[in-house]
């Protein structure tokens, strides 16, 4: 194997696989399971190829990339000479493969390589793209096609298949001498790899029970038996026994009892359909009987997931005005890191849009050669062309969602380059760009997401229409620019002079593109409620938004949650947000591009709650959880009481979450073999202030493989329609802060009751498969 091969002398160049001993390798068990042992593309990946890694700095040097026998890991050499090191990535972490010069990196730095030799690997989460150039077109094609096939097979695996694939991958890594046999020492190493500390006496007893040959080595079916025992789920066996009785066979009628207790369709027809879908034994399936393995398959499938699978599709009414929806929104979308010295990239727009974001921000500044640029002004962030950003938006705006995308323009350009911006948008976006009110629709009312499908809207300043009465020029001041200056100075000086100057700096060509999202300074709640203008949008910094929330509640009685008044934000701000859009963004003084808690803004009905998508943390977890429902389309219908306040909320709930167990938690310290997590589970409720609460289990020592808690955490939920439920797993540390292991967040309204598995995500939102939590959820109206 390439992994573990001794480093060659610095002067030696990597050899082509055909030049060395790397000829065809015997495909591993995993590839046989996937049915790809004879596939020509996968065979080429197993032999390996010399590929050049294209970067912005340095001369691209050839490295040997090779698929491992597990069919899911690609290893390659990193660094050269004494700095040489072995690197790898998982095929499961690849979001997509792009052929040719279809990434920002290859367009900028790959001109020296033929387009047909090049391809890009786009990773899930925050990992950077990997831009590669092969020696020839055929090699590049094999990698693109081979990786695409592997991704498809891995994605189609059931959870038990993923688990089986994972455990055999670990076995291959633990088999140090590659003889396909496992000594007890190698078994102990494997146990540390899978995050479990097992007593030596018990581990050796298990080893000897499986070593039927008595040669102190496990091989073949002995290894299979050892893995089967390791992967036992006693808690599922107990649950199965509770419904199946002494014969340990579940009839369709007994499965009905289980479904009834789960709160699901418990008809005999549904029970039989589940048996026929998940039961592995053909004879049992024909008799409508389910064995333990089939029951486990069912609970680990999407049917046993905590997320209501109906909510993975668009299921809400999409015909209401835009202001009746929470809209997934990004701040400083162009940034890949911080707003002081980070890199600006069109790839950041691609990632945001493919994550379901529907409102992206462009900070537009004067560029050289008459071309406007996008970057964070007056900082060291790099610059990208406005034209390139619009091209990326055109290519990716509607891949994830068909519903409208809003371009929030923060405009610092002069008239000439504003006209250039308008020209680029018209030429590049074409019919996607909305430049006129919808035919047959009142131009003074906001249309619905359904009516605006496939359209790009521009949010920017607008000149007064010649046929209208002259507007106050204050409406032409950039709202975000005003807010940021307020934060820095805490007062505005020479306001009228700046406004007059600003009024003369709006290009008619750009103004004409603003239809339903005219950016205006906030006139104050009293004025806004007296004269609502649905097609005007005001922006608030998080500080200003909190101040408004506080002011909106002043003068009323102390807030007590009730169905008639479930929200603390005060009826005034909720009424304002029921008629027109508002945008909230992070304080401009945050050097690290940190985020604020979006929940408090959603509580007040704010729609465009913009966050730094490039900054992972609980705030982005909440955002991902909020927009997980409704098919991840980026639009979520607000509760009725926020669409026509004051309205009645739903009845309060008692929520009970029994944390039962976890499975295959990731190992945090891969460098230190003896390091094993001490996991605990924290369940967080995020919603109106009276609902916000956290509770956690005790920690379990030295077991990240199959820890079991059986602890019940109880919550009261006064406004369930706004609540989010967040499950967090941490590694307990008695001397410092706990380390993050994984999390999953979803709307309480999307939670399914009963026994459920939760598939954990990493800090940046990537899957941690096969890591899961197993819980029991019960909700009861109060």
Image (tube, rainbow, N blue to C red):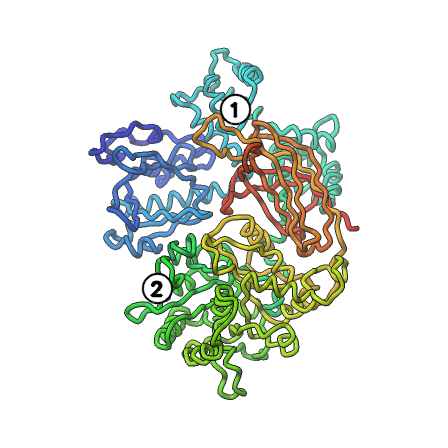
**Residue 40 seen:** yes
Residue 665 point in image, percent of width and height: 54, 34
Residue under circle 1? 224
* Mark 1: secondary structure: helix
Name the one closer to the observer, 340 or 470.
340
Q: Residue at x 44, y 37 (%)?
A: 35
- Residue 235's image quarter? top right
Query: Residue 109, relative to residue 637: is it above or below?
Result: above
Residue 106 point in image, percent of width and height: 31, 53
Name the one closer to the observer, 543 or 323.
543
In the image, taking residue 737 as reference, residue 576 lies left or right, namely: right
In the image, taking residue 715 as reference, residue 385 lies left or right, namely: left
Name the one closer to the observer, 169 or 491.
491
- The tag on residue 2 is none
Query: Residue 645, relative to residue 43: is it above or below?
Result: below
Discs 2/1, front: 2
Q: Residue at x 69, y 60 (%)?
A: 568
Outermost residue toward the top? 214
Query: Residue 587, relative to residue 224: is it above or below?
Result: below
Residue 159 point in image, percent of width and height: 56, 38
* Mark 2: secondary structure: strand
Name which of mark 2 and mark 1 comes first in the sequence: 1
Q: Quadrant of the N terminus?
A: top left
Estimate the spatial distance between the alpha carbons at disc 2 and disc 1, rounded to whole Å: 56 Å
Name the one closer to the observer, 741 or 116.
741
Residue under circle 2? 385
Q: Residue at x 54, y 31 (%)?
A: 677
């Amino acid at each position: 194997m390439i992994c573990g091969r001794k480093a060659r002398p610095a002067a030696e160049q990597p050899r082509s696989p055909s030049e060395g001993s790397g000829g065809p390798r015997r495909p591993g068990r995993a590839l046989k399971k996937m049915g790809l042992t004879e596939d020509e593309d996968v065979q080429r990946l197993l032999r390996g190829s010399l590929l050049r890694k294209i970067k912005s700095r340095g001369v691209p040097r050839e490295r040997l990339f090779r698929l491992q026998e597990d069919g899911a890991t690609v290893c390659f050499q990193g660094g050269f000479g004494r700095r040489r090191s072995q690197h790898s990535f998982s095929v499961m972490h690849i979001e997509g493969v792009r052929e040719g010069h279809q990434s920002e990196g290859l367009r900028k730095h790959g001109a020296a390589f033929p387009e047909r030799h090049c391809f890009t690997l786009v990773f899930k989460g925050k990992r950077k793209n990997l831009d590669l150039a092969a020696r020839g077109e055929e090699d590049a094609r094999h990698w693109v096609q081979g990786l695409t096939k592997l991704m498809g097979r891995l994605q189609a695996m059931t959870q038990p298949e993923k688990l089986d694939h994972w455990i055999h991958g670990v076995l291959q890594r633990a088999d140090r001498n590659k003889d396909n046999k496992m000594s007890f020492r190698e078994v102990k190493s494997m146990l540390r790899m899978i995050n479990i500390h097992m007593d030596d006496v018990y581990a050796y007893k298990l080893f000897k029970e499986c070593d039927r040959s008595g040669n102190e080595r496990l091989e073949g079916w002995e290894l299979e038996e050892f893995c089967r025992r390791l992967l036992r789920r006693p808690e599922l066996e107990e649950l199965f026994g509770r419904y199946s009785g002494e014969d340990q066979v579940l009839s369709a009628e007994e499965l009905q009892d289980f479904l009834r207790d789960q709160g699901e369709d418990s008809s005999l027809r549904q029970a039989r359909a589940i048996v026929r879908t998940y039961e592995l034994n053909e004879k049992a399936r024909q008799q409508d009987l389910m064995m333990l393995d089939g029951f486990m398959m069912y609970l680990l499938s999407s049917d046993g997931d905590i997320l209501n699978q109906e909510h993975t599709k668009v299921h809400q009414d999409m015909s209401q005005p835009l202001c009746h929806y929470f809209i997934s929104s990004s701040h400083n979308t162009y940034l890949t890191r911080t707003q002081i010295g980070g890199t600006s990239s069109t790839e950041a727009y691609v990632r945001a849009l493919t994550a379901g974001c529907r409102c992206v921000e462009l900070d537009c500044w004067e560029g050289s050669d008459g071309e406007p640029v996008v970057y964070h002004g007056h900082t060291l962030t790099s610059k990208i062309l406005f034209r390139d950003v619009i091209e990326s938006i055109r290519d990716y705006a509607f891949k994830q969602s068909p519903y409208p995308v809003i371009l929030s323009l923060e405009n610092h350009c002069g008239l000439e380059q504003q006209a250039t911006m308008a020209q680029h948008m018209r030429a590049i976006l074409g019919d996607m760009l909305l430049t006129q009110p919808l035919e047959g629709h009142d131009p003074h009312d906001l249309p619905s997401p359904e009516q605006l499908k496939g359209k790009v809207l521009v949010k920017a300043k607008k000149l007064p229409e010649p046929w209208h009465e002259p507007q106050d020029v204050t409406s032409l001041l950039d709202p975000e620019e005003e807010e940021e200056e307020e934060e820095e100075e805490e007062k505005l000086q020479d306001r009228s002079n700046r406004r007059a100057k600003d009024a003369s700096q709006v290009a008619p060509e750009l103004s004409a593109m603003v239809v339903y999202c005219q950016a205006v300074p906030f006139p104050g709640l009293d004025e806004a409620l007296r004269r609502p203008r649905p097609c005007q949008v005001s922006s608030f910094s998080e500080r200003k938004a909190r101040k408004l929330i506080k002011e909106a509640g002043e003068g009323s009685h102390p807030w007590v949650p009730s169905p008639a008044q479930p929200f603390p934000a005060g009826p005034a701000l909720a009424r304002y947000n029921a008629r027109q859009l508002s945008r909230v963004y992070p304080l401009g003084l945050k050097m690290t591009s940190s985020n604020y808690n979006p929940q408090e803004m959603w509580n007040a009905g704010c729609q465009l709650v913009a966050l730094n998508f490039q900054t992972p943390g609980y705030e982005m977890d909440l955002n991902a959880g909020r927009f997980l429902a409704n098919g991840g389309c980026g639009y979520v219908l607000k509760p009725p009481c926020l669409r026509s306040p004051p309205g009645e909320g739903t009845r309060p709930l008692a929520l009970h979450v029994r944390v039962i167990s976890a499975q295959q938690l990731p190992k945090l310290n891969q460098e230190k073999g003896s390091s094993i997590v001490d996991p605990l589970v924290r369940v967080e409720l995020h919603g109106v202030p009276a609902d916000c609460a956290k509770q956690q289990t005790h920690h379990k020592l030295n077991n990240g493989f199959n820890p079991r808690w059986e602890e019940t955490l109880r919550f009261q939920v006064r406004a369930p329609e706004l609540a989010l439920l967040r499950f967090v797993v941490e590694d307990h540390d008695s001397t410092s802060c706990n380390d993050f292991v994984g999390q999953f967040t979803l709307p309480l309204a999307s939670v399914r009751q009963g026994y459920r598995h939760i598939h954990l995500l990493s800090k940046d939102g990537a899957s941690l498969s096969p890591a899961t939590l197993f819980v029991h959820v019960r909700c009861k109206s109060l």
